[in-house]
Image (cartoon, rainbow, N blue to C red):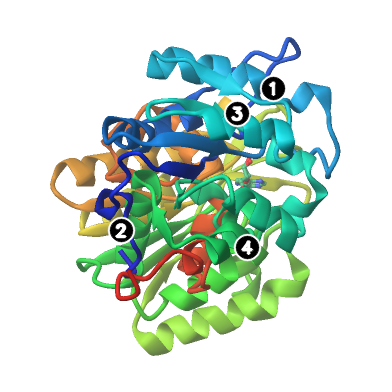
Amino acid sequence: MLGKLDVRDLGVAGKRVFVRVDFNVPLDEGGNVTDDRRIRAALPTLTLLLDRGATLILGSHLGRPKGRVVEELRLAPIAGRLAQMLDRNVMALRSVVGPDVEAVVAKAEPGDVVLLENLRFEPGETACDEQLSRDLAALCDVYVNDAFGAAHRAHASISGIPRHVAQSAAGLLMAAELEHLGRALDGAERPFVLVFGGAKVSDKVPVLRNLLERVDVALIGGGMAYTFLAAQGVDVGGSRLEPDLVSTAGEILREAEERGVRVVLPTDHVVAERLAEDVPTRVSAPGVPEGAMGLDVGPVTAGNFAMEIAQARTVLWNGPMGVFEIPAFDSGTRVVAQAIADVTSRGATSVVGGGDTAAAAQLVGVASRMTHVSTGGGASLELLEGKELPGIAALTSVEES
Ligand code: AMP
C-alpha cells in the first residue's frame, strides 16, 4: 500500500483521533441526505477506531461554500444520519476551530464522536493555511485520512494537519483504494485491458500515456473515441470532438503501436440528429455522417469490446460508452459493464473509476460484482496518471513510524 502507515497499525486507545472523512453527500432542498453511500463507506474505519477505544474528531467538507458560512451546507443533517448508522450520539459542532470547539474536544472521552462544522467554511481550508492546519492538529493526537475522494487536494485538513502530528495513517477506505489502484500501476495480472469512455479526452490523456506501458489492450468508447477516430481520418459528423487534442490522440495511437498495445476504437455507432430523450436513432458504420452525432457505441463494437474483456485478467474501467443517462444510448455501457462483471466472476480483477463510471455500474446493477469501485473520480485519475497525491504524500511512511 505505497508504504504508508495504516490505521490498523496504530495504537489509539485513549487517544484523540482526527479522521478526515468525505461526507460530501447530496442533500435535497429540505437538507435531507439523499444518498448516504459516502457516510456508509467511512463506517469500517470509524467502528474500528471506536472499538479500540479512541475519541473521534471528524472533519469533512460539503459543497463549495468558498470560505464562508452557508446555512444550507452545515453538517448537522449528516451528523444525524451518522448517529443512526453508528447507533451512538454524534456531537455536531457549529464551528471548525475556536474556543467552543476546543472546549468540547477537551471534554470528549473514548467512544465519543465529535463532528466539526463544514471545513470549507474556513477560508484557510482550501488555501492550506498554516495556522488552521496547526489549530486542527492541536485537537488530536493522531491523524487518519479516509477521504480518498479529496486526496488530490492540498488542503489544510488533508496535507496541512499531518505536518503537525506525530502519526498520520490511511483509513481502511483509503488503504483499499491505494491497494487496488496501486496494483493497476504495479503488478497487475495480464492480460490487462483498459476500458476508457466518457466525454473529456483531456482528463484521460495523461492516464492513457502513463498506462500504455502497463496494459495489453485499450478499448476506447464514449465521446472521447471521436477525437481518436478523427485522428485516424474517420468521419465523426457532429459528434463530440476536442479538436486541440486530435494530434495528441494520433501520437498516443502511434505510441501504442510501437509498444505493441492494441487500441480498439468503435467501428459502429448509435447516432441521432441531436442529444435528446425521444430523438429517432440509427446505427451508422464505420463513421458518423454529417448532421448526426455518435451517442453510443454500436452493437458490433459493444460485442467486440465484450470479447476483449472476456480474455482479461485485469480490467480498469473509466468512463461510460455513451450517454448512458438516456436509455436510448445506454446499451454499450450495459454490455461492457456486464462483460466486466462476468469476467470478474471468473476470477479476473476489475477496478472501476469513480464518478460517472461508478454511477453507470450502479445503474446496470453490477457495481457489487466488481472487485473495487473507487470512491474518487478526480483522485483516482490523478493517481493513475502517476502523480503523487498530496493526501497520500502527507501520510507517515512505514519506515518513519
Ligand atoms: P467523463 O466525466 O469524461 O467520464 O464523462 C462522462 C459523461 O460522458 C457522461 O455524462 C456521458 O453522458 C458522456 N458521454 C459519453 N459518451 C458520449 C458521447 N458519445 N457524446 C457525448 N457525451 C458522451
Q: Are marks 1 and 3 in contact (CB under 8 Å)?
A: no
Q: Which residue lies under the disc numbered 3?
A: 104
Which of the image's four quarters has the N terminus? bottom left
Q: Residue at x 30, y 70 (%)?
A: 398
The residues bearing labels 4 and 2 have C-alpha atoms spaced at a distance of 22 Å
Secondary structure of the residue carrying tag 2 is: helix
The amino acid type, in three-letter code, at marker 1 is Asp
The residues bearing labels 2 and 1 have C-alpha atoms spaced at a distance of 43 Å
Q: Residues within 10 Å of mark 1 (few under 14, many from 20)?
A: few
Observer-nearest of 78 and 268: 78
User: Which mark sits nearer the N-terminus, 2 or 3?
Assistant: 3
Q: Which residue lies under the disc numbered 2?
A: 179
* Label 4 beta carbon within 8 A of ligand 1: yes
The amino acid type, in three-letter code, at marker 2 is Glu
The amino acid type, in three-letter code, at marker 4 is Asp
Q: Is 267 rendered above or below residue 360?
A: below
Horizontal relation, residue 18 to residue 29: left or right: left
Determine which of the numbered discs, if any, sits on residue 203 in the image: 4
User: Which mark sits nearer the N-terminus, 1 or 3?
Assistant: 3
Q: Which residue lies under the disc numbered 1?
A: 278
The residues bearing labels 1 and 4 have C-alpha atoms spaced at a distance of 30 Å
Mark 2 or mark 1, whichever is nearer to me: 2
Determine which of the numbered discs, if any, sits on residue 41 in the image: none
Q: Residues within 10 Å of mark 3 (few under 14, many from 20)?
A: few
The residues bearing labels 1 and 3 have C-alpha atoms spaced at a distance of 56 Å
Which of the image's four quarters has the C terminus? bottom left
Percent position (x, y) of residue 378? 58, 55
Q: Residue at x 49, y 69 (%)?
A: 393
Residue 287 occupies which quadrant of the picture?
Answer: bottom right
User: Which mark sits nearer the N-terminus, 2 or 1?
Assistant: 2
User: Which mark sits nearer the N-terminus, 4 or 2?
Assistant: 2
Secondary structure of the residue carrying tag 3 is: helix
